[in-house]
Image (cartoon, helix red, strand yellow):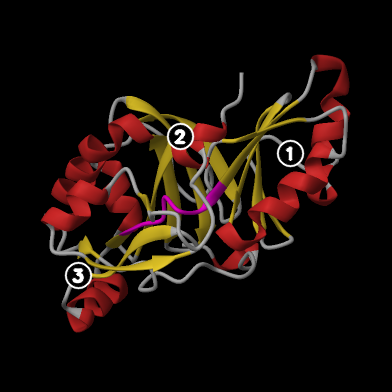
Amino acid sequence: MSLAFLTAAGGASAPAALSPFDAATTADGGVFEVRDGWRIASGFGHPAAEEQACEHAVGWADVSHLGKLEIQVSADAADELAGLAGGLALGRAVRDRDAWWCLLTPVRALLLCDPGVLAGLRQELEANAALKVLDVTSQFAALRIGGPLARETFARFCALDLRPERMPVGACMQGSVARTPGVVVRMATDQYVLLTGAALAIYLWSVVSDAGGRLGGRPVGVDALSAPSELEEAGTHA
């Protein structure tokens, strides 16, 4: 059975794919544009307020359009998975070829990337017969959460231990997030990407909005929290 119906349609005439958060971002006053075939919230009408939140409190942006590949191997091919992107280790997120490679278990990894490089990376991985590659882009909702109060925001709804000694820059962790299964990747000192099942997106948006709003935060456009191009030095994390 093909899972192609879960992938955003391509082509100039194809309708824009909608994020699982679309109803929530629309209700919160999102301003939208189409990028890479996706309807993306590029702002919420108050650029200065968004910048202020990201610099002094916390902002959260819908990044569900990020490409997501799940890579699986059989137990006897675990070395093939661990050898990707120059070497993967459990609990670490490696930045390589415009993507983040996260080894979640010895036989399962998750890759996050810009939509423009998704097809090429998928083709490259599928050339290795030991790897089973699934495009799970539409199965996950994703939020980028950043700012000096980002970790405090997580602490109000997340059971994961995100203290720097347990969750340094370049780490990934899976577990209970707002009492649902989730994955968190720490991409910079004050910036994380949070993934959960698409069916739980509206619930997650309300939880993050409640927690972050109480700290002076707000939803922000996708460009307000720019993606780090590379890992920060380990000694710089807070």
Helix, strand or loop for disc 2: helix
Q: Amino acid at mark 2?
A: Gln
User: Residue at point 62% right, 40% down?
Assistant: 69
> Which label's residue is closer to the chain start, 3 or 2?
3
Report which residue position mark 1 lands on: 89
Using the numbered discs, state the Cα–Cα distance from disc 3 to disc 1 in whole angstroms.
38 Å
Q: Amino acid at mark 1?
A: Ala
User: Residue at point 61% right, 70% down?
Assistant: 229
Residue 163 as seen in the image, left or right of residue 30: right
User: Residue at point 21% right, 35% down?
Assistant: 203
Q: Are marks 1 and 2 in contact (CB under 8 Å)?
A: no
Report which residue position mark 3 lands on: 44
Residue 139: mark in rendering: 2
Residue 196, image x, y percentages? 40, 35
Helix, strand or loop for disc 1: loop
Residue 167, compared with residue 183, is above or below; it is below
Using the numbered discs, state the Cα–Cα distance from disc 3 to disc 2 in whole angstroms.
25 Å
User: Residue at point 23% right, 45% down?
Assistant: 205
Q: Which residues are magenta?
A: 61-67
